[in-house]
Amino acid sequence: MAETPVPAKAAAPKSAPAAVPGGYFGRVLVVDVSDGSSRTVAMPERVLREHLGGAGLGVRLLLDLAPAGVGPLAPEAVLAFVFSPLVGTPLTTSAKFAVVAKSPLTGLLTDALASSHFAIAGKLTGHDAIAVVGRAAQPSVVIVDGDHVRLEPAVDVVGMSAARTEEVLRERLGRAFKVAAIGPAGERLIRYATLSHDGRHAGRGGLGAVLGSKNVKAVAVRARTKVAPADPAGVLAAAKDLRTRSFGTATAKYRELGTLANLLAFNALSMLPTRNFQQATFDGAPALAAEELADLRGQAKNSCASCTIGCEHIYQLSPGRGGRTMRVEYENVFALGPLCGVSDADDVLEASARCDDLGIDTISAGGTIAWAMECAERGLLDAPWLRFGDGPALLRALDEIGTGTGVGPLLAMGSRAAAEHLGRGSDQFAVHVKGLELPGYEPRTLHAMALGLAVNARGADHNRSGAYEADLGGDLDRLDGGAPHVAAAVETEDRAAVIDSMILCKFLRGVFVDEDDPDAPWGEWAHLLSLVTGWDLDADELRSTARRIVLVKREYNLREGWQPEDDWLPPRLLADPIELPSGRTARLTPERLRAMVDGYWAARGLDAHGRPRAVDSPTGDRRG
Amino acid sequence: MTATPLAAAAGAVVLAGGRSSRMGRPKADLEWHGSTLLRRTCGVLARAGLAPVVVVRAPGQSLPDLPPSVEVVDDHREGLGPLQGIAVGLAALEQRVGVAYVSSTDLPFLHPAFVRRVVAPLLAEPALEVVLPIARGYPQPLAAAYRTRLAGRVADLVAADRLRPAFVFEQSEVLRLDDEALLTDPELCAADPTLESVVNVNEPADYDAARSRPGPGVVVECFGVLASRSGRGARTVAAATVGEAARAVDLVLDRHVLAAVNGDQTGRDPHLPLYAGDTVAFLSADAGG
C-alpha cells in the first residue's frame, strides 16, 4: 500500500482518483494522535474487491496496519472506522459503518457496526476508512474535515456521556460535524465500553476502551466531497425498488414492535436465557414484553439515517422514575431483565439508560452482573445484596461499575477475567465465548446457533451468526445438532460477512429471500454492488468473498493468539439440560458440539485444528 | 401438555394398503380438518417420538402428501392381509430400531399418549416381543407394538398361509393390556380416558360421524406483530391441525409466520396434528435482533 502524507491544510478532495471503482475513494486515512500527524494509505482495487468494506475491509486493515500481538490498549493498536461502497447511496439502510479493533475483552478481533449519519459524513471526508493509532497527550477530539485533520483538546467533555459529548462538540464545531464519542466507561478503559453516535452504539467488544486508551474522547467528521456510483440511474432504480419492498411483511416485526418482539416468543420456545443461563424461560417476561410495553411506555418510533424500516422504538420510564425516554432493543432488555431475573420494567429501562450514560455494552454488562449475582448467591462473592431478581441491586451494580467502587472494578473486567480473578470454580458458570458474553439466544435449544456462537471470530455474537434462523425455520430439529446445522451455520455466517461488509442492515435480509432460489440474496447483493462499483460481480464471486472474509478474520485471530479450544461453549451449556414444555429434554453434549465444530472446520477448509491450510491462507501467509 | 417422548429406539409402521372396500374409497385420502387421515396418523406417531415412520402401501398405490421424513415402502404381495404388511414394515425397520408401533390408517382419534403407553413395556422389558392392547373389548393388532426382529417370523407365517395376527401371538412373548391396564398410565388416562385411540372408521357413516365432531380444544397464542393483528393472550379454539388453529385466529401460514406446538419445534406445516390441551404459539419468522 502506497502512503501519502496529508498536507497540513489540504483542500477538500473534489473527486476520487480515476482508477478507483464507484463508491470508493481508494484510500484510508491514518491518524496518529500521538503527534496529530496523518497519512493516507492507498487501497488497491484488488483489496477493495476482495474485502468490500465494513467488517471485511476492517479486518484487512488490522492485519496490515496493526503490529502482531500488540496489546489492545497499547498506543500502537489500531482502531478503524470503516465505511463501505454502499454508504452515501440512496439504498435503504446503507448508512452504516464498522468499527474494528483488537478487543480488550477477548484479546481477539472485534468489529461492531452502527447506523447513523456518521457513516455518510465519515465516508464523504474522502476516505474508505479512518484509522486511529497512538496516544494523545491529553483528552482530545480527532477532527477530520475532508483532508484536513487536527486534534483539539477535549478536557471539558471528560466524564460526559457520549450523547452529551456529541452535543457539546457539535455546538462547538458546527452542526455539519457528526461526532462519535465514548462515555465515562471508555475513558476508564472498562473492557466492554461502547463507542456511540446519535444514540447508536458500536457496542460489543470494548471499542470504547480502545479509543479511550488513545486519550481520544471523540472523532468528529464533516463531509467535504461526493462519491458517485458507477451506474447512478441503476442505483436509483434499485433503491426505489428496495424501498418499496422494505415496507412489506418481511420487516413488519421491526417496524411495528422492534426487536423486543423477540422476548415473549423466545420465552414460549425455551430460548430466553434466564438467571445466568440457569433457565430458558422467565416468569416475568410478560411484564417486559413489547406487546405490553409498546402500549404502556411507547413514545415514538424512529429510523436510522437512510432507513425506511424504522426499527427504533422509544420507550419512557414511568413518571415516578423521571419519565426519561430511551431506545429499547431486545438484547438490552434480555440482558438486564431475564438474565438477571429482573422483571420490573422501570428497573430494566433505567438500567439500560445507565448503560447508555456510562457507555457500556448492555449484553456484557448484564452477563457479567448475572454471573456476579450467582457468585453472590453461592457465597463466592462478598456482596450479599446482589441477588437475582433485585432491580435496585442491578442498578447499584451498574453504578459501582461506573464509579469503580465496591464490586465495580471486578465487574468491569467482564465475566471471563472476573471469574479468573475470583476463582473458586466461578468460571464454570461464566457464560461467554472467547471472553464475549452471550446474547439472548439459548444454545441448548438452538443447536445451529450454538455452533455459530462457538466458532464466531468475535466471540458469542448473534450478529455475525444468524444460525438461529435455521433452527427456527422448521427444516431441521433445533435440539438435534448435526450436519444440517453445520451447513446452516456456515451459510448464515457467510451471509452476515457480506452484509456487514457491503454494508446493509440485517433487518432487511428477509426482503431478499426467495424460497425457491437459495441464491437469490447473493445474486441481488452482487447486482447492487455491481451497480455501485462497476464491477461485474455475480453470486459465485460474492460467496467466495464471504468465505474469504470469514477466513481473514480467523487469520487475524490466529495471529493474535487464538487457540482451537477457543471455538467452544462455556461449561454450563454443555452440562445442564433444559426441559421443554413438550416433554423433550434439550441437551448439548460436548461430543455433539465437538462433532459440529469439527464439521464446521472441515466445511471451511480448515485443518483438524481449525487453522487455514497453508495453500488456502486468505492473507497469502504460508503456514506449515 | 407435558408428555415424555420416547427415545428414538422405536419406529412406526403405518399400513396404508388396505382395500377400504366398505368405505368405498381409500381411507388414506380421507380429508381430516384440512389434512388427510394418513397424514394425521403419521403425524401422531411422529409426535409420539417414533422415528422413522414407515408407510407400507400396495404396489402403485397413490398416497396423499406426506412429510419428507416419512418413508414409503411397497408391499408387492397383494391380498394377503395385514400380516404381510406388518412383515414388510418390520423388515424395513429391523436394522435401525428394535421396536415398532404398528398402526392402521383409520384411527382418527389416535393419541400419542396411547402410543407411548403401548410401546413403553417393550423398551423396558427385553424378553417381551409384542404389546397387544385389548381395548374397548377387542384385541388391537393394528394398534400394537412389536419387536422388529419378528419380521422374519411374521414372513414365515405368511409364507405358510397362516395369515391371522393371532398366529404371531401364539409364537411370541406377548403382554396383553386391557382397558384397566392401559389406563394405569396417568398421561393416557388424562388424555384419552375412553380409549378413543382405537376407534376406527370403516364405513362412510363412521367417517361422517367422526368428522362432524369439532376439533380438540387447543390453546393458541400469537406473539409480536401477529398479536397486533390476531389478538393478544391465550385463547382456546377447536383445531385438529396447526392449519386449522391458524385459520381460527385469521392467520395464514406463509413464510413470515412460524408455529410451535408445546414450545417444541417451529415450522409451518399446516397438517401437523393437534390434541386437546396442546398449546400452539404463532410467531413472526423474522427472529433476529
Image: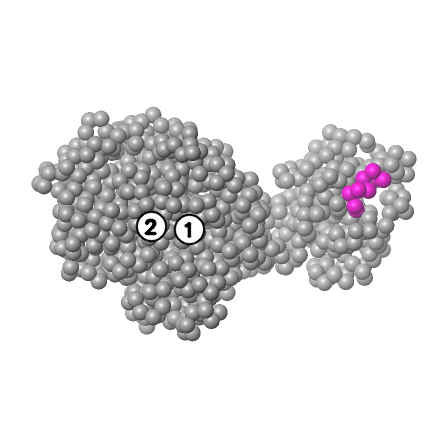
Q: Is residue B172 magenta?
A: no
Q: Mark 2 and mark 1, same subunit?
A: yes
Q: Circle 1 sits on which residue?
A: A434
Vertical order, A461 against A362 (above or below): above
Q: Work out whether residue A545 can be spotted.
A: no
Comparing A70 with A597, the one in front is A70
Which residue occupies 48% across, 57% down? A272
Q: Quadrant of residue A245?
A: top left
**Span of residues in magenta:** B146-154
Q: Is residue B148 magenta?
A: yes
Residue A618 drawn at (x, y percent): 38, 33
Report the colour scheme. one colour
Circle 1 packing at 10 Å, graded few (<14), some (14-19), many (20+), is: many
Which residue occupies 68% across, 47% down? B8
Q: Circle 2 sits on which residue?
A: A103
Q: CA distance from mark 2 to mark 1?
A: 10 Å
Q: Which residue is at the far left?
A: A9
